[in-house]
Image (cartoon, rainbow, N blue to C red):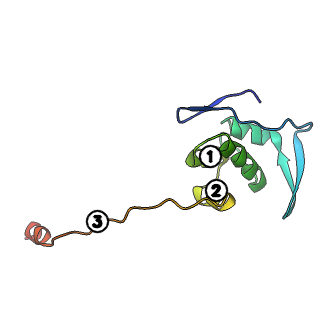
Amino acid sequence: MTDRIEVQQLSIEPRLPRAAAATIFMCGSSGIAIIDTVAVERAVAGHLHGARLTNDEAYYAASVLLDAGAELHQVADMVGTDLIRLRRWFSLPEPTRKPHRACESTENVSAVAA
């Protein structure tokens, strides 16, 4: 695949293995996965436009994009899944959140309410 896609000012060239057919069968621990390589190639190139990938196809496309250096939220958009699922699939940590600051004084609040 020679198409280049721009991912947040990072030019990446995802490398998909060339398949002899439009559909490939991959064996994994959960059984046989059927991958439509044309759909995966379109997703990786950023041309999905509302088409849906199966979970196996989305996983395969996401792994190619992440290996190429794409950002997690952009991969989620491109393959049509959410960040939670991507984090589970690839055992990625949850983002750290900063604690909210509590009000230091209630005097200002009561003055405004009066």
Disc assigned to residue 86? 2
Looking at the picture, which amino acid does disc 1 mark? Val
Work out whether mark 2 precedes mark 1 in sequence or the reverse, and give the earlier one. Answer: 1
Residue 100 coordinates in the image, percent (x, y) = 33, 65
Kindly report the distance in space between the C-alpha atoms of the residues bearing marks 3 and 1: 32 Å
Work out whether mark 3 precedes mark 1 in sequence or the reverse, and give the earlier one. Answer: 1
Label 3, residues with CA under 10 Å away: few <14, some 14-19, many ≥20 = few
Up the image or down, 41 lies above or below 79; here it is above
Residue found 10% across the figure and 71% down from its top:
107
* On-image quarter of the N terminus: top right
Work out whether mark 2 precedes mark 3 in sequence or the reverse, and give the earlier one. Answer: 2
Residue 92 coordinates in the image, percent (x, y) = 61, 59
Q: Which of the pair 96/22 is nearer the observer?
A: 96
Q: In this view, does 104 lie to the left or right of 40?
A: left
Kindly report the distance in space between the C-alpha atoms of the residues bearing marks 2 and 1: 9 Å
Q: Quadrant of residue 13?
A: top right
Looking at the picture, which amino acid does disc 3 mark? Arg
Q: In this figure, which residue is indicated by the disc labeled 3?
A: 101
Residue found 91% across the figure and 38% down from its top:
21
Residue 45 appears in the picture as rendered: yes
Q: Are marks 3 and 1 in contact (CB under 8 Å)?
A: no
Q: Do the residues labelled 2 and 1 touch (CB within 8 Å)?
A: yes
Label 1, residues with CA under 10 Å away: few <14, some 14-19, many ≥20 = many
Disc assigned to residue 75? 1
Closest to the camera, between mark 3 and mark 1, is: 3
* Secondary structure found at label 2: helix
Up the image or down, 34 lies above or below 109; here it is above
